[in-house]
Image (cartoon, rainbow, N blue to C red):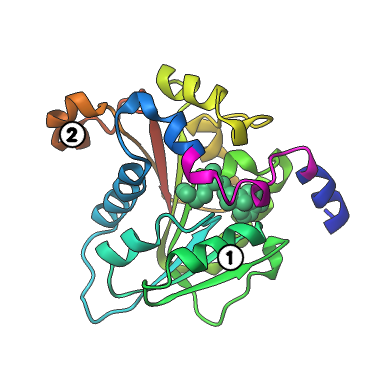
Amino acid sequence: MKLTGILEKREKLPDFDDYADNYESLVKDNIKASGFHPCYFDEHKIRTLVSDFGTTPRDKTVRFLNFGCGIGKSARYIYKYLPQSETISVDISKESIERAKKRNKDIPNVTYQHFNHVSELKYDQPFDIIFAANVFHHVPDELRLPILEHLRTLLSPDGYLYIFEHNPFNPLTKAAFNTCEFDQGCKMIPARDMCENIRKAGFKKIDTNYIVFFPKPLSVFIPYERYLNWLPIGAQYYIKAN
Ligand SMILES: C[S@@+](CC[C@H](N)C(=O)[O-])C[C@H]1O[C@@H](n2cnc3c(N)ncnc32)[C@H](O)[C@@H]1O
């Protein structure tokens, strides 16, 4: 698809340049019912990813691509749980990238990059981890497959793609999504549809896990959440693929 066509499509979807300043407060309002601060979910995703990826020797660099990094809310957790990571954080929103840079001045080993089209993302070395959190429901349908195909070319043969998305079958997620200003015009993606696209993009090993089952008042049960990752009612899911 030509760049003009892509930009026209994007005009109909929320432009995150308009939300860079108030993104954090909008998310905070939107997930009030969970009882958690939004940072809890940012940290939870990275903790989950790192525990799933497994331990890596401290002296081995882990090349990490944060695709659709937004205002950089995950950066400090990537560094906290994977201090040996070398991260490239990319987004199509220039304003969000500027915010991310300012916000994470104290976080080492992160490079930020704005791009317009995924084909601009070219690197000398492959990534061990490619992470996209709540990005794909903002990507027009017909661009998802080409993006996934390109991301696959950036992944090391033994690396993993991790895609986190909202689970449309969780009623609380659905309610929060429907009232979220920057999700207007978007549709949540059922895990099986996301898996299908990932499979079409050429990934072979594809695994879905559900996360976030308990609100803050029930947080004593959170350590048991990992036994429920097969249950398709978690507020979010993640797909691991290679
Ligand atoms: C809901 S925000 C999530 C940001 C971040 N991943 C996080 O968890 O805080 C969605 C992000 O996806 C980005 N985005 C939308 N379409 C994109 C695309 N085609 N390629 C890369 N990023 C995109 C937006 O600019 C926005 O920053």
Q: Nearer the viewer, residue 108 or 200?
A: 108
- In magenta, the rendered stretch is 11-25
Q: Which residue is mark 2?
A: 222
User: Which residue is rendered at x = 43% and y = 54% of the image?
Assistant: 73
The location of residue 9, given as percent across then percent down, is 80, 43
Q: Residues within 10 Å of mark 1 (few under 14, many from 20)?
A: some
Q: Amino acid at mark 2?
A: Ile
Quarter holding the C terminus is: bottom left
Q: Amino acid at mark 1?
A: Glu
Which image quadrant is residue 118 in? bottom right
Q: Which residue is mark 1?
A: 98
Mark 1 or 2, nearer chain start: 1
Does label 1 point to a residue whose CB lies under 8 Å from ligand 1? Answer: no
Q: Is residue 5 above or below residue 14?
A: below
Q: Secondary structure at mark 2?
A: helix
Residue 16: in magenta span: yes
The location of residue 8, given as percent across then percent down, is 84, 46
Residue 176: in magenta span: no
Horizontal relation, residue 26 to residue 122: left or right? left
CB under 8 Å between callouts 1 and 2?
Answer: no
User: Which residue is rendered at x = 45% and y = 31% of the image?
Assistant: 29
Q: Nearer the viewer, residue 25 or 241?
A: 25
Q: CA distance from mark 1 to mark 2?
A: 34 Å
The location of residue 92, given as percent across then percent down, is 66, 58
Q: Secondary structure at mark 1?
A: helix
Q: Nearer the viewer, residue 47 or 144?
A: 47
User: Which residue is rendered at x = 69% and y = 39% of the image?
Assistant: 141
